[in-house]
Image: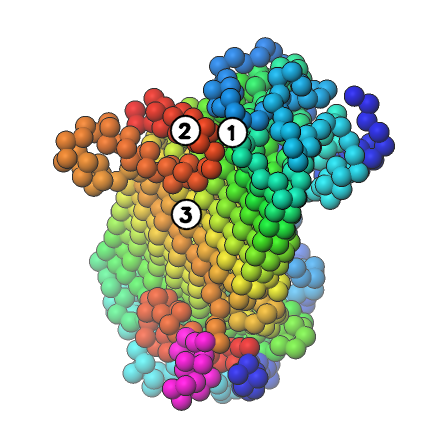
Amino acid sequence: MSKDIHAIASKPYEYGFVTQIESDTMPKGLTEDVVRLISGKKNEPEWMLEYRLKAYRHWLTLTEPHWAKAEYPKINYQDIHYYSAPKITEKKASMDEVDPELKRTFEKLGIPLFEQKKLAGVAVDAIFDSVSVATTFKGKLLEAGVVFCPLSEAIEKYPDLVKKYLGSVVPHTDNFYAALNAAVFTEGSFVFVPKDTVCPMELSTYFRINTQDTGQFERTLIICEENSSVSYLEGCTAPMFDTNQLHAAVVELIALDYANIKYSTVQNWYAGDPETGKGGIYNFVTKRGKCQGKGSKISWTQIETGSAITWKYPSCVLIGDDSVGEFYSVALTNHFQKADTGTKMIHIGKNTRSTIVSKGISAGKSENTYRGLVQINRSAKGAENFTQCDSMLIGKQAIANTLPYIDVRNASSSLGHEASTVKVSQDQLFYFAQRGISMENALQTMINGFCADVFKELPTEFAVEATQLLSLKLENSVG
Amino acid sequence: MILVSPLIDLKSKASQKLQQIGLPTVAHEDWKYVADQDFEVIKSVSHAVQDYKPCSLILETEYVVVLGKSGIDQGRSRLPKNGVTVEFGDSEVNQNALSGLTQSDDGMVLKAISEMTGVLRILVNPQISLDQPIHIAFDESFLNEQWIQPVVIIELGEKATASVVVHPIMVAGGVVNGLVVVSVADHAQGEIVALNLEGRSAQFVSMSYRATLAESSQFQFLQASHHAGKVRSDVQVTFTAPHANSVLRAVLVLDDQDAVHLRTHMTHLVGECFGRQLVKSILNGQSVSEFHGGVYVAKGADLTDSSQSNENLLLSDQARAISRPQLQIHADDVKAAHGANVGQLDDRHIFYLMSRGIPRAQAEQFLLQSFILEALDSISMPGVKSALKKRLMISGEIGE
């Protein structure tokens, strides 16, 4: 039976193509002049340049962290392009004016970029290397008072909001990659949902790294005022290169009183060559949400299937009383991938609640680590946390680690943590085979069952995509 | 006691490694929350502590080894006669048992080896089954030391059975840094109860236990902490052959400034072994418990069944529970799990008992007792079990 499973053909990474498009790429290397140049290219105001320079100078004082369970060749930060943009920097009034080659790329990626795809009901901001190429449905969103635009546009049009919130959740002093991002971020999405507003549609951003040796440093800032809510999705792909590319993003979410932010990610960056492990994306991102207001809620859902190495800990700082943090994650690693991912739930306000459901699947020679912190501070009276982190191992070479950190400092809160490790057993596969169900379908069904708690948290459109993505990624891996 | 060459060689190897890695510090991840000692500058050593009487836990029929700085106090010891060797000194066997540890990455273990003045060795011959436990107690000769570092080796031959109780070392101001190395041969059964009592007057108490299990062997360990002071216990079990079975338990009843860092780690080098870790803490006052549990399943160690559980009851807003139950799984056909809970006494349970006429204080007492009873009931030695139950359960601190 094992041989049968091995015989299932492996499907190559289908987003690995390179778009041949003229681009404006800055020479490799990082200096203060490069930071000034990036700021200049974006026509940024003086205060923004100062912010970047401060971060850059701080970054110079930091050393690269190496605590996570991943070994990789030293990154040469002077061997990276910090800015690359398709040569169509003017935002087009109509989608027809966008370079047809670029449009074809987004079509290949299945992004509903065109206005005629209104039925999809998703507003999209598409980011190609360092710049935002197109944002759809802006008008309709503005009618509702929702601002959804590239961050560079927000810096120009809404400087007060950006000044107030940028770096308020992840300051440039937070960590090595946050400092680097603050210095050189080139694009990202900005969402502002005003008081008493429910965003009328799902918002979505697609990130695409196209140029070789390019780093992508996007920055996303989402602010939900009192009684407002938004659901935001992001997807990521990259072409196949045999050199590694760095992706060091920062995402900041701010939820005021009774606001609700749902942030979903399907991450499918190129994971490197399946046979040799060469190439792939280093995905070192800092994602954090601040539940600042009373009764606010931030929910992270992530499907992590790509990248050579992932370090990612979407976190919630629960400051407001009765605020809620959630983290639902499926992390799948295959071949030579290494994922070190999890969350941090910091309980500060009274009666704050958090839920963590993490499903790790490791196949091939990959290593999958859950690392999570639940910290219930003295002030967080009546706080509650529930954590469940399960691992599934497929194959003899795979590794699964579970590294939770739990720290409780008051006597009125409660916390429960459960974890287990299971395998796809031959008995279960045999059961399916007996009933005429193919190995492929059996595996898909079992994975779906294992991850059901997370998939049900995804918006429907993403849930279907995530299910398919997982089964594709796992082909040829069960034995 | 003058040491002969084998131990000198071990000491020098351990010392070299210690110079490389140094003693653990606050910055060391494992010590992050508990220790705030700078071990190099410990100076004050004062008088003996009188309030702990080991005899209260030792029945007259049980064996006792009273160890002093320079050897076994034969007058106060009651040693088993047949099939058991109890000696203090050095030998080839000692060297074998300790040589692997001279390259340990734990500075406390290295320091204990590099500064030992001799080794207490208890050898239970194959097929020998001891009907009474052996108590290891320490005499007053240690009291004026800055560092008290006994090294004990316990070896159980094939199909041997023995229980050992390690009593605390009473000291004021100094640092206790003990090392106990256990090897359990095929089909043998070993049990250790580590008493971590009345350590508050010591600056720091560190105890390291290293057990190696052979085929179809069994090893049970229980640590009881009360009035513990600042403590670090590090219990590591290595499964080297299939069908071995080990259960590590700890009951921590802490109050005031007690801070216990407990590390339990199971390394499954081969498959088909069974491991359990169960740590229960009751935390009052400003006490801290940090549980750092680990399960490592090596590649190919299939059919391993290993799990860990950490349960904490917080009775005070100033107390703190830290839990890090960690799994590292490199084999795909294993059962591995962990669970951690932090909470308080359940109001519904208190109400249930009160509705049956039991006063609140007593109801709380019952619930706390039942919480730790699960672990204490596993002790096979009746004398130690009843004495510990009495001490931990009737203690005025619980339930107040």
Q: Residue at x 77, y 31 (%)?
A: B90
Please, which colouring scheme is shown? rainbow
The residue identified by callout 3 is B340
- Above or below, A196 against B143 in this view is below
| Disc 1 element | strand
- Above or below, A218 against A50 in this view is below
Q: Which residues are magenta?
A: A427-446
- CA separation in Å, label 2 and label 3: 28 Å
The circle drawn on residue A162 is none
The circle drawn on residue B195 is 1
Q: Position of residue A401 (x, y in %)?
A: 54, 58
Q: Quadrant of the C terminus of chain A?
A: bottom right
Q: Dot 2 surroundings within 10 Å: few (below 14), some, or many (20 or more)?
A: some
Q: Position of residue A30 (x, y in %)?
A: 66, 59
Does residue B329 belong to the magenta stretch? no
- Marks 2/1 in contact by CB < 8 Å: the verdict is no
Given this view, does label 2 or label 1 mark the residue nearer the observer?
Answer: 2
Q: Are marks 2 and 3 on the same chain?
A: yes
The circle drawn on residue B386 is 2
- Above or below, B93 against A245 in this view is above
Q: Residue at x 66, y 56 (%)?
A: A31
Q: Chain of mark 2?
A: B
Of residue A448 and residue A158, the one placed in the foreground of this image is A448
Is the magenta region chiefly helix, strand or loop?
helix
Q: Are marks 2 and 1 on the same chain?
A: yes
Given this view, does label 1 or label 3 mark the residue nearer the observer?
Answer: 1
- CA separation in Å, label 1 and label 3: 24 Å
Of residue B359 and residue A316, the one placed in the foreground of this image is B359
Left or right: residue B339 versus residue A382 is right
- Marks 2/3 in contact by CB < 8 Å: the verdict is no
Tell me if I can see residue B50 in this picture: yes
Left or right: residue B97 versus residue A459 is right
